[in-house]
Amino acid sequence: MARQKQIKRKKNAINGWLVLDKPYGITSNEALGKIKRIFSPQKVGHAGTLDPRASGLLPVAFGEATKTVPFVMDGRKVYRFEVTWGAETNTDDTEGDVIATSDVRPDADAVAAVLADFTGTIMQVPPKFSAIKVAGERAYDLARDGEEVELAARPIDVHRLELVDCPDADRAVFEAECGKGTYVRALARDLGRRLGTCGHVTELRRLLVGPFGEEDLVDLDEILGAAEELDEGDAVEALVEEFVLPVREAMDALVEVSVSLEDAAKIRKGMAILLRGREAPLNSQVAFASHANVPVAIGSIDKGRFQPTRVFHL
C-alpha cells in the first residue's frame, strides 16, 4: 500500500504580540507549542522563559514582532513570589532536594528591615540550576550530572522589593521589580541567609515584562475556548483580531520618528534619510521610524539622519 502523503497545514502570516498567561506546570516551550497549534504562524518566538513551576506573563511574538523581542526582554520585570522559611534546596525552589534547614522564622519586622540591602544594584550568585553557561555547558545540565557548579556573582538591578503578605510564620510573599538577569530564586535564598534562616521559592508569578502588564494577559483556556467556537476558515483571523496586539506595542519606550510615504519607501530599501522638522531628534542610539502609525524600521539617528538596521514588512 502506498504511503499517504502528510498534508502540511497552511502557515499564517501573523504579526504582533500575544501576552500569554502561562499556566503552572508546563514549560515555556510547551506553552509556545500550544499557541503554534492554534495559530499556525509562519514565525513565532517568546520573550523571556518561565520555569514550569512558575506562572504568568509570557510575551509571544508573531512574525515581524520577533524583530522587537530584544526590547521586551531588556525591559523591567515584576514578579510576585512566596518564600517558605526553614529549608533551602539545591534548586532554590520546590523542585530540588533540601540541602539545609533552620528552626528560625523571621517576623514581618525582621524581613522589612533587610529589604533595603536587596534593592538597587547588588551582586547576585545565580542558582546552580540555571541556564548560565559554564565552559560551554548549561549550569543546570552540569548540576543534574552531579558536578559541582561554581558560579560567579554578577551585578543585577532590583528597582523595588516589597513585603506583600505574611500568611503565617513559615511563609512570606514579596513583589520584586527587577532588571534583566535577576533570579528570583536566588533572592529568596539570599533573603533566608541574611535573616539567619533558610528559604526557597514555593510560588512564583510574573506580572510584567517590559511594556506588557497584567491588563494585557490572555488565558490559554480562553484562547482554546474561542478557537473551538469558530469555524476553521475564519478562526485564526478572528483570534488575531481578539487577542494579538500590534507590533509597535513593544517599542513604546523607543524614540519614534514619523516619516513621509516617500521616505518610508527609501527606508524599506535600507537607505538613510534626513529627518525634517524643528522637533526632529538629532541623535539616538535606538529609534524607530513609522508612517501612518505603522512601524517601518528600527534604526539609529546620527546628526539628524535616520539609518535603518531592521526593516519591517507590515
Image (cartoon, rainbow, N blue to C red):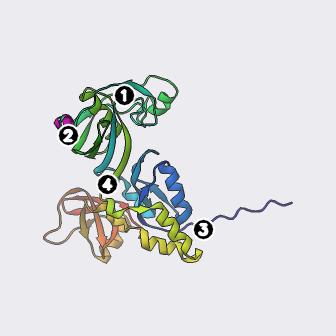
The quarter of the picture where residue 8 lies is bottom right
Taking the spot 37% from the left edge, 29% from the top edge, the residue there is: 88
The residue type indicated by label 4 comes to: Leu
Res 10 label = 3
Res 119 label = 2
Q: Residue furthest left?
A: 278
Q: State whether residue 193 is above or below residue 182.
A: above
Contact, CB < 8 Å: mark 3 with mark 2?
A: no
Q: State whether residue 116 is above or below residue 226.
A: above
Secondary element type, mark 2: loop
Q: CA distance from mark 1 to mark 3?
A: 45 Å
Q: Do we see residue 231 in this rendering?
A: yes
Report which residue position mark 4 lands on.
Answer: 208
Secondary element type, mark 3: loop
Q: If the image is split into quadrants, where does the C terminus sit?
A: bottom left
Q: Position of residue 195 (x, y in %)?
A: 24, 29
The residue type indicated by label 2 comes to: Thr
Q: Position of residue 102 (x, y in %)?
A: 33, 25
Task: Please state which of residues 173 and 309 is positioned toward the viewer in this rendering.
Answer: 173
Dot in front, 1 or 3: 1
Res 255 label = none
The quarter of the picture where residue 154 lies is top left
Pointer 3 local density, CA inside 10 Å: few below 14, some 14–19, many at least 20: few
Which badge, 2 or 1, is on the more N-terminal residue?
A: 2
